[in-house]
Amino acid sequence: MRRLAGILGLLLFVGAGAVGGIRLWGAAGRTYDALTSTAHVERGLEPRMTADQAENLTYGYLNRMRVLLADPAQHVTPYVAQVWAVTADRAAALDGCIPAGMGSGVVWVTVGRGDYLNLSDRAWSRAYRPGDDLTTQACTAPAHAGTIVIDDATGEILGVYPDSGSLNPHPSPRATLAPGI
């Protein structure tokens, strides 16, 4: 009987330790995720959208572009690497293709990889045209990486800026702003 009680006590102790360990691991995981988050919000801003919503809009755009590729073998799986909520005026600091002096409204800027095809004129960017000069092509020519600007108030994609990395002169490299901006 004593042996059975000892075994049950040991199992209870191990079980409680396992449950506590799982809870601690979960809390540590959430803390780690918060520290490694790719989303940054400029100090003093209170965006309406969340970083997840901005990412989802970006993924939706990139997935729609996938079906437009002439050669599906050239498809690049979408991945959003960075997300910023900034004032429109500050967005140009994140990518040299984004126009400066666009106001004080809040925008989301996402940077990543995928099928960045700029096929239509938008409020802040224009579609790629094969006869464009090199400077314009650097911000409009199809690429497997790029930047998208989204209006926080409406969710409208204001600009799409492909970045092939090979066209010169590209007005980037992108500035890396501190998480607190």
Image (tube, grey):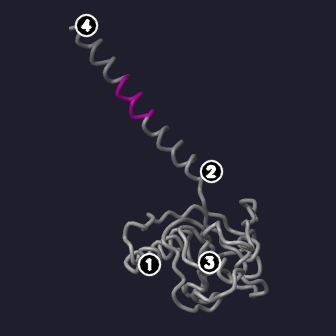
Residues at marks 2 and 3, CA–CA distance in whole angstroms:
28 Å
What kind of residue is marked 4? Arg
The mark that comes first in sequence, 3 or 4, is 4
Task: Determine which residue is flagged by label 2.
Answer: 35
Q: Earlier in the sequence, mark 1 or mark 4?
A: 4
Mark 2 surroundings within 10 Å by alpha-carbon count, few (fewer than 14), some (14 through 19), many (20 or more): few
Residue 170's image quarter? bottom right
* Mark-to-mark CA distance, 3 and 4: 73 Å
Vertically, is 175 above or below 133?
above
- In percent of width and height, residue 30 lies at 52, 49
Task: Please report whichever mark, 2 or 4, sits nearer to the chain's N-terminal start.
Answer: 4
Closer to the chain start, of discs 1 and 2, is 2
Identify which amino acid the numbered label 3 is placed on. Answer: Tyr
Where is residue 16 drawn, in percent x and y? 38, 29
Say which residue appears at 30% left-offset and 12% top-offset. Answer: 6
- On whether residue 20 falls in the magenta region, the answer is yes
* Type of amino acid under label 2: Leu
Relative image position of residue 119 (x, y in whole percent): 51, 87
Say which of marks 2 and 3 sits in front: 3
| Residue at 60% across, 86% down | 158
Q: CA separation, marks 1 and 3?
A: 14 Å
The quadrant of the rendering that contains the N terminus is top left
Q: Residue at x 58, y 87 (%)?
A: 130
Write down the residue under mark 1. Answer: 65
Q: Secondary structure at mark 2?
A: helix
Magenta stretch in the rendered image = 14-21
Q: Residues within 10 Å of mark 3 (few under 14, many from 20)?
A: many
Badge 1 marks a residue whose secondary structure is helix
**Dot 3: element:** strand
